Amino acid sequence: MKIALMMENSQAGKNATVLNELNNVVLPQGDSVFNVGMSDENDHHLTYIHLGIMASILINSKAVDFIVAGCGTGQGAMMSLNLHPGIVCGYCLDPSDAFLFNQINNGNALALAFAKGFGWGAELNVRYIFEKAFLTGERGNGYPLERAEPQQRNAVILNDVKAAVLKSDYLETLKSMDQTLVKTAVSGKRFQECLFDNSQNDEINAYVKSLLVEK
Amino acid sequence: MKIALMMENSQAGKNATVLNELNNVVLPQGDSVFNVGMSDENDHHLTYIHLGIMASILINSKAVDFIVAGCGTGQGAMMSLNLHPGIVCGYCLDPSDAFLFNQINNGNALALAFAKGFGWGAELNVRYIFEKAFLTGERGNGYPLERAEPQQRNAVILNDVKAAVLKSDYLETLKSMDQTLVKTAVSGKRFQECLFDNSQNDEINAYVKSLLVEK
Amino acid sequence: MKIALMMENSQAGKNATVLNELNNVVLPQGDSVFNVGMSDENDHHLTYIHLGIMASILINSKAVDFIVAGCGTGQGAMMSLNLHPGIVCGYCLDPSDAFLFNQINNGNALALAFAKGFGWGAELNVRYIFEKAFLTGERGNGYPLERAEPQQRNAVILNDVKAAVLKSDYLETLKSMDQTLVKTAVSGKRFQECLFDNSQNDEINAYVKSLLVEK
Amino acid sequence: MKIALMMENSQAGKNATVLNELNNVVLPQGDSVFNVGMSDENDHHLTYIHLGIMASILINSKAVDFIVAGCGTGQGAMMSLNLHPGIVCGYCLDPSDAFLFNQINNGNALALAFAKGFGWGAELNVRYIFEKAFLTGERGNGYPLERAEPQQRNAVILNDVKAAVLKSDYLETLKSMDQTLVKTAVSGKRFQECLFDNSQNDEINAYVKSLLVEK
């Protein structure tokens, strides 16, 4: 699985810690990790708004399969990612959140709180969250198993409703928003590498490249 | 303030408890509470998908000012409500979540977990959440106060991005989705009373009424 | 490692679930589990007071190496176990509590909350707690490692202070308290089997047997 | 009510914040607050072991009515305080812990975690904990009310068992432990003021003074 980690300005100083935990948990099973947000406090400035746009580009282009995002409380990241087509982002504070969200909601993103509740030893909780998010096998099986049917049905309906209320073309949604936001969202070198090396959507690539040239 | 409480099938048995706590906290300061979801396990069957639609109708018609929703983990309700135009729904597990979401994200809905973590004595936590959600004065002031400016700016940008990716007309979003979902969402007597008594939008009322007739 | 699980009346109905999680986590690595408290609501009635006495007998006789106890909030069990000589009981709500308590405080007992916060899906949290309590290798190494020295020193001093304030002979402490409590504490068949099959202290066995005869 | 706050070396830097929240919550209702532990990182060095001794002196001399203590995880403080005669110390991570411990266990001390889980905004959680610990009226009434009888009975039995296992004279327990620990525990000026201004036990005062002279 290809996993992108993206962190914004308020908690950028914790990126090395979180990335280290993610790598330690998932690299041994052959997953790839792309650290596409801020890597420290001096990196190019991103907010949770940008994280949502970045996530939408990486998921809709199929450049990655899963997003780990977050902000201070995680609420901004959670809402920002969920705005966009194709993103189903849970909010995750403890390891069982990660497992249950995978089994019940079967999403493709998690928003974590990297400041609230993130005290001493919080790297342990992050590690355990990643273990239950990424090392527990198949997703979307429901929990408990006998509740799988309605849980899976509701997950599908959620996607249908989302598709219904959104503009119908992904690139149209991207072009409809303030383009200075999108330009900043795609301005990172690591983001661009992740996208252009892995994207399966030429149109999205072309549009992102057009923004980079402009800039 | 007008506050709607909406609960779905999996936790309908807890509605009386949650409603009681909400009433006890907010009625003394003159807020109104509308219990528009399931009131017990025998009530008409709603899922978190319906809660999102119901919330969107009540908020976009200005029938209510704030929504308290939830489901088993709260994740489904959180995502479902956030799909819709005009809803900014936080995820709330403890009293400081409620306060911080109000101050930083300044939303109009909270999704609670009514099963996960909801053990013995959970009515106390629910009460304390409502106290910090509804009895702490002005919202949107930022926390801490000196961070108000970027927090308020990001809250506005979030709304702008949401407006950009969604279909431009609220009723169009409502009409675009599977109408059997919408019909079920509006089928409750208490929901209808809340809407028709308080709505400030005749178009929404008319559309909902047209669905009721059809049915 | 020999691990005793002990639950009291208020949460006896959850014993099967908790025992199942404990067995699934530790049996594969060769640990033994003794379910010495109430096994269901109809079992002989124990309170958190009895759990403390039971734990003290099993630990001081070296019948077991570690105790998993609990009550509704876990506070009664935590305090009750900590009264007794030789018991160092942590309070554990999440997986990192279990790991940190092992590394920093290096105790021999954990008190869990089996009602407060114990909602739907709580068996997952219990499982993850057991994983971090019992499957993470050597204990007492400090966390982080560079803090090991003062943490280990304080753990030793805590034991010294406890020994200083308590009556000097273990059996004397047992005989000093209301003997009807002790008799009830030792009245369970599974408790007696665990003790008499594994105890390394004949004096304690003899005393417990004398109480059983009396009764 | 007279409330002592005591913090140790690892989290001394947070003393001003915690003290401020405690003062803001309880001073308006006429309680007194004594900040008897470390006030910052340069203050005389105390560990959680010392906090237990300090708490025992202040409670057994009736200099104060209630202790708020803590350490990094809170586990060391919780265990250290609970060692001593007359201290009934709960472990408190959220506001409902505080309320439930007061009603069910009716203790006289709370241990908080000032590092683990203590992230951004944690001062809010501390404030809410103090509100529910100190502003909710009478204690020891049980929760729910119909469970008062067994809860109150168990609280009494816990004290009886503790008294039975401990040396029978308070000063004897104090004199039995390593006296360098006690000397350090009583070395603070604010601690001494709190004790000598409020103690109702001349023997304890005399003993503490004898240690100060020696030193």
Image (cartoon, coloured by chain):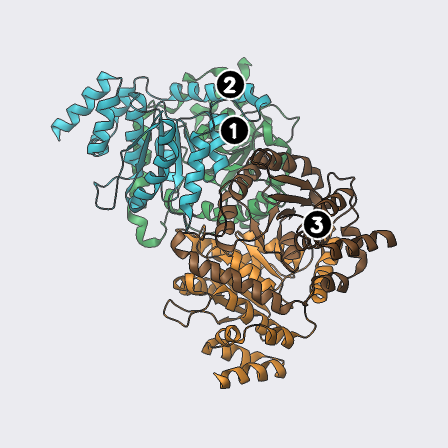
Chain colours: A brown, B orange, C cyan, D green
Query: Is residue D186 shown above or below B85?
Result: above
Provide the residue designation for mark 3: A199
Graded by Cα atoms within 10 Å as few (under 14), some (14 to 19) or many (20 or more), the crowding at tag 3 reads many
CA distance separating discs 2 and 3: 55 Å
Graded by Cα atoms within 10 Å as few (under 14), some (14 to 19) or many (20 or more), the crowding at tag 1 reads some
Could you say where residue D33 lies in the image, as x and y percent from the top left? 55, 39
Quadrant where the N terminus of chain B is found in the figure: bottom right
Q: Tell whether label 3 touches label 2 (CB within 8 Å).
A: no
* Marks 1 and 2 share the same chain: no
Provide the residue designation for mark 2: C153
Could you say where residue B124 lies in the image, as x and y percent from the top left? 45, 54
Could you say where residue B106 lies in the image, as x and y percent from the top left? 65, 60
Chain to which mark 2 belongs: C
Q: Amino acid at mark 3?
A: Ser
Query: Is residue D4 shown above or below D47?
Result: below
Chain to which mark 3 belongs: A
Q: Residue at x 60, y 74 (%)?
A: B174
Q: Secondary structure at mark 3?
A: loop
* Marks 3 and 1 share the same chain: no
Q: Secondary structure at mark 2?
A: helix
Q: Nearer the viewer, residue A40 or D201?
A: A40
